Image (cartoon, rainbow, N blue to C red):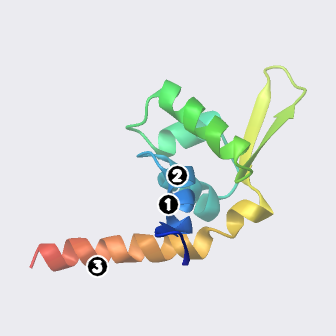
Amino acid sequence: MKKVENVVFCKVDDALSILSGKWKASILLTLIYQGPMRYGELKRALPNITPKMLSSQLKELEDEGLILREEFAEIPPKVIYSMTDYGMSIEPILSQLHDWGINHITRNSQ
């Protein structure tokens, strides 16, 4: 960490601000492990998320460059969401965080 004039700049805060929210990590892990998906497939994979929340979280992840939204000129319209190469760089971190969460739950249930 870099300390400047008694202020510590922690880049973990910056990273967490991108992943903040109840659903972003779940969306990313779903796309990482299940591959590209349509909106309806994501909705079924995350049954407790509301359509409005899914749409907003997907938009934010797309704006951050973590996921790609591809539109296909078909009738009915087809949209596929997938991970970008940049987005895939977060996979080891999310995987370790997931494993830590499992260990934490196991530890607390003993």
Q: Residues within 10 Å of mark 1 (few under 14, many from 20)?
A: few
Looking at the image, is mark 2 or mark 3 nearer the viewer?
2
Q: Farthest top residue? A: 75
- CA separation in Å, label 1 and label 3: 23 Å
Rendered position, 15 above or below 39: below
- CA separation in Å, label 1 and label 2: 6 Å
Name the residue type under label 1.
Asp
Residue hosting label 3: 103
Q: Which mark is residue 13?
A: 1
6 or 78: which is nearer to us? 6
Looking at the image, is mark 1 or mark 3 nearer the viewer?
1
Residue at 74 percent of width and 51 percent of height? 65
Name the residue type under label 2.
Ser
Residue hosting label 2: 17
Dot 1 or dot 3: first in sequence order is: 1
Dot 2 falls on a residue whose secondary structure is: helix
Query: Residue 101: image x %, image y %?
Result: 33, 70
State left or right for residue 62 relative to residue 46. right
